[in-house]
Image (cartoon, rainbow, N blue to C red):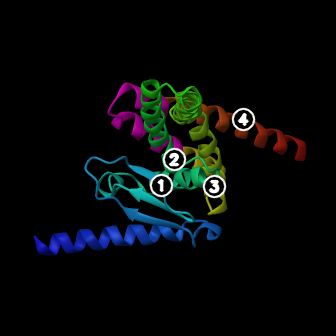
């Protein structure tokens, strides 16, 4: 039992080192890769852990079930989200909303019109920011843009364009099969459809360039 646990820990450390090795060099000084210890976490996600540090967190148990090429493209998708500055930031909005609501209730009690107006304005700004962060269309658009950039990163690390598309498409199909709910499944399906359209455009562009040479 101890031997199995030791070998499993070594395999996890080896995978984390491998992933750090395929981080673009310009990110290696401020992006770290760690296994998550949460209960039922997402497969992979990123979060700020300081003013100049981002951590990519991976559920290594689920991760181990994927093929290497699938892992690579999903990892580069997350790297692309960091490069595009679309990872979730520290959530000041919920705190601001709570302060604004508390202030509004308090000012209603003491009937201070100016402070009530300021409290309502704070509620409005924080509420709008929360809406923006949780907007489904915006999240899908950002994910599709990250997929495009992940393909470019894959070619930078030696993948051919067709293999990069195939690997990411295969990973998305696996995520669709494993999705716990319809909403999450729909997001992956949207990404897969966009990826297919992008692959067809890339194929047509390559063919046209080839025809021009001939």
Q: Which mark is residue 83?
A: 3
The reply to whether residue 214 is in sight is no
Instruction: Label 4: state its secondary structure.
Output: helix
Q: Are marks 4 and 2 in contact (CB under 8 Å)?
A: no
The reply to whether residue 88 is in sight is yes
Along the line of sight, which residue is nearer the eye, 148 or 92? Answer: 92
Specify which label sits upstream in the sequence, 4 or 2.
Answer: 2
Rounded to the nearest angstrom, the CA distance separating label 1 from label 3 is 13 Å
Name the residue carrying label 1. Answer: 47
Name the residue carrying label 2. Answer: 88
Residue at left offset 75%, top offset 36%: 204
Name the residue carrying label 4. Answer: 201
Quarter of the image that includes the N terminus: bottom left
Are there few (<14), some (14-19), or many (20+) residues within 10 Å of tag 3? few
Quarter of the image that includes the C terminus: top right
As drawn, 152 above or below 131: below
Rounded to the nearest angstrom, the CA distance separating label 2 from label 3 is 13 Å
Based on the picture, tell me whether residue 182 belongs to the magenta stretch: yes
């Amino acid at each position: 039992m101890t031997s199995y646990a030791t070998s499993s820990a070594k395999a996890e450390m080896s995978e984390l080192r491998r992933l750090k090795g395929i981080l673009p060099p310009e990110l290696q000084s401020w992006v770290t890769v760690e296994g998550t210890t949460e209960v039922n976490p997402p497969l992979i996600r990123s979060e700020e852990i300081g003013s100049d540090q981002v951590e990519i967190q991976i559920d290594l148990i689920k991760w181990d079930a994927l093929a290497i090429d699938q892992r690579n493209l999903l990892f580069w998708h997350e790297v692309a989200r960091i490069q595009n500055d679309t990872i979730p930031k520290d959530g000041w909005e919920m705190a601001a909303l709570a302060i604004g609501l508390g202030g509004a209730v308090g000012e209603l009690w003491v009937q201070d019109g100016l402070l009530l107006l300021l409290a309502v304005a704070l509620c409005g700004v924080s509420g709008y920011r929360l809406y923006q962060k949780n907007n489904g269309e915006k999240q899908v658009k950002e994910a599709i843009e990250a997929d495009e950039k992940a393909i470019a990163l894959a070619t930078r690390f030696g993948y051919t364009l067709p293999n990069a598309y195939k690997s990411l498409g295969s990973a998305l199909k696996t995520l669709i099969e494993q999705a716990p709910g319809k909403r999450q499944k729909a997001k992956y399906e949207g990404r897969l459809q966009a990826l297919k359209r992008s692959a067809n455009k890339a194929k047509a562009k390559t063919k046209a360039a080839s025809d021009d040479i001939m």
